[in-house]
Image: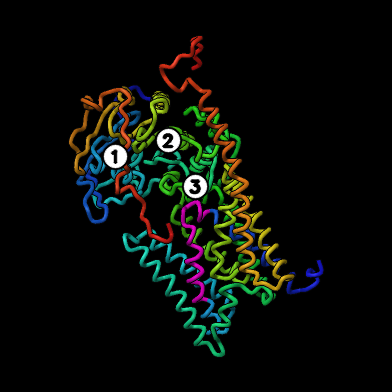
Amino acid sequence: MAQAKGEPVGEPVISLRQVTAELGGRPVLRGIDVTVGRGEVVALLGANGSGKSTAVRTVIGQVPVTGGSVEIFGTPRRRFRDWARVGYVPQRTTAAGGVPATVTEVVTSGRLARARFGMLRKADREAVTHALEQVGMAGRAKDSVDALSGGQHQRVLIARALVSDPELLIMDEPMAGVDLASQEVLAATLRHQVEQGASVLLVLHELGPLEPLIDRAVVLRDGCVLHDGPPPKAVGQHALPGHDHVHPHDADAAPVRTGLLT
Amino acid sequence: MEFLNYAFMQRALLAAALVGITAPAVGIYLVQRRQALMGDGIGHVAMTGVGLGFLLSTSPVWMATGVAVIGAVAMELIRWYGKTRGDIALAMLFYGGMAGGVMLINLAPGGSNANLSSYLFGSLSTVSDDDVLAICLLAAFVVLVTVGLRRQLFAVSQDEEFARVTGLPVRALNLLTAVTAAVTVTVAMRVVGLLLVSALMVVPVAAAQQLTRSFAATFAIAVAIGVSVTLGGTVTSYYQDVPPGATIVLLTIGVFMVLTLLATPLARRRARLSAARDMACTADVPGTRSASDEVTV
């Protein structure tokens, strides 16, 4: 699976062609092309509202496309079933739900892609422990996720994505609101995954500590691809080490709230 | 223990215990999804089913189950497709269901709101053998779903978007949760009544999570609380001649308050321990050195 950088990449692991999508009747993607080759690390950059989160959400099927095609591992997304090969880190500030849950319980839910009927074998439990070790959270395995800091929440969400041993990682703003220590842990985890041959699609506000890992950057503006090539150089404030963005989440990322039921 | 000699009490206690198990078992997933009031909505819709049962002279329990399931599926569909006015659509469903029940029962020959009241607030002493059979079958379905599919339902209720990427059939599981909640409402209907059923789905879970850190423990303790209060409430209502539904719900809220008071020192202790652990760890902060330069990385 591992392939040296620069070799012909063959079948791309993700391929968006002329994808259009709208949210609430408003066009958000206006025909974008994004590909991620095998073993490649691609960053999707752009301002709030540029459509970068929507683009990854078309890949996982959370946002329906109105035109163009989305393929994962060469299979049209609608027919793609092999989700154990994909690890997803959604844009979240918390891993908690309405009921207490331990770090282990949350991470274990990521293993369901491999343990189809919910039966956990020894290998599954070991995978959970291993994923927690990778993000430096093994010591908090039995703690409630409610007791964690923002950066620790993000580490748990990444462990949950890694636990199915994915070949492709899709991460939506994994560094948003994460403290410096956790950022370094996350960068090291990602580097390890890339060395193992994983392909990565990242949504980022700025390149930050992940910059050395990134092969290619796709910059979106107003639902169109503005740049597709080597990562742009960060300038000004954004270039400073430790510069930490904490943004309110995109309005389009909010789930539909229906009053009484939510 | 002389109440055990009466057949009506045996039926009542069996029905009560099953409600004590099923209501929190479904409720925990609703609370986890932050849809704590869904049970209340389904209860309103089920009233139309009770009315239909009287009008057509069939079993109100099975009729209520059918209508509640249709209502719950409709709510789930509104949640998917409903945009900004979803709450209005739900309000129409709730109040339409309630008004429909009142209307239908008055159209039924010999029917009046007095018949309805035993379904609104529960009437354990009038639980028949047929009711008990229906309750047993429905409760078995609820337990099978909520325990057998606990990992899948946990994943979907915790993070729906992520669950989709693990390949879980998210929509099917959401519909199954809605149907299971509807079935639970009708299981609980004869015991605590349609208007109070939501309390048994939500309050035992809220009480349990005062003490717990894990989902599994919350589930177990919530069910234990559920069974204790339904049995306790039923026996109390036998001795004191008070309405069982109201007794059970007030007992549950009492348990919640007691556990909340007990949990406060527990939570403080945990916070202190976890703070102490965070303080002890210096390796996370780049650049800090202890005086003796012992750097553990």
Q: Nearer the viewer, mark 3 or mark 2?
A: 2
Where does the magenta region start and end?
B29-49
Residue type of the residue flagged with mark 3 = Ala
Discs 3 and 1 share one subunit: no
> How far apart are labels 3 and 2 at the CA level?
21 Å
Q: Mark 1 and mark 2 in contact (Cβ < 8 Å)? A: no
Residue B155: assigned label: 3
Residue under numbered circle 2? A150
Residue at screen point 49% across, 71% down: B44
Residue type of the residue flagged with mark 2 = Gly
Q: Nearer the viewer, residue B135 or A175?
A: A175
Q: Nearer the viewer, residue A201 or B27?
A: B27
Residue type of the residue flagged with mark 1 = Ser
Locate the N terminus of chain B and report the quarter of the image it occupies: bottom right
Residue under numbered circle 1? A15
**Residue A183 position (above or below residue B14):** above
Other-residue count near label 2 (Cα within 10 Å), few / some / many at <14 / 14–19 / ≥20: some
For mark 2, give the secondary structure: helix
Asked whether the viewer can see residue B52, the reply is yes
**B181 lies left or right of B248:** left
Image position, residue B117 (x, y; %): 57, 78
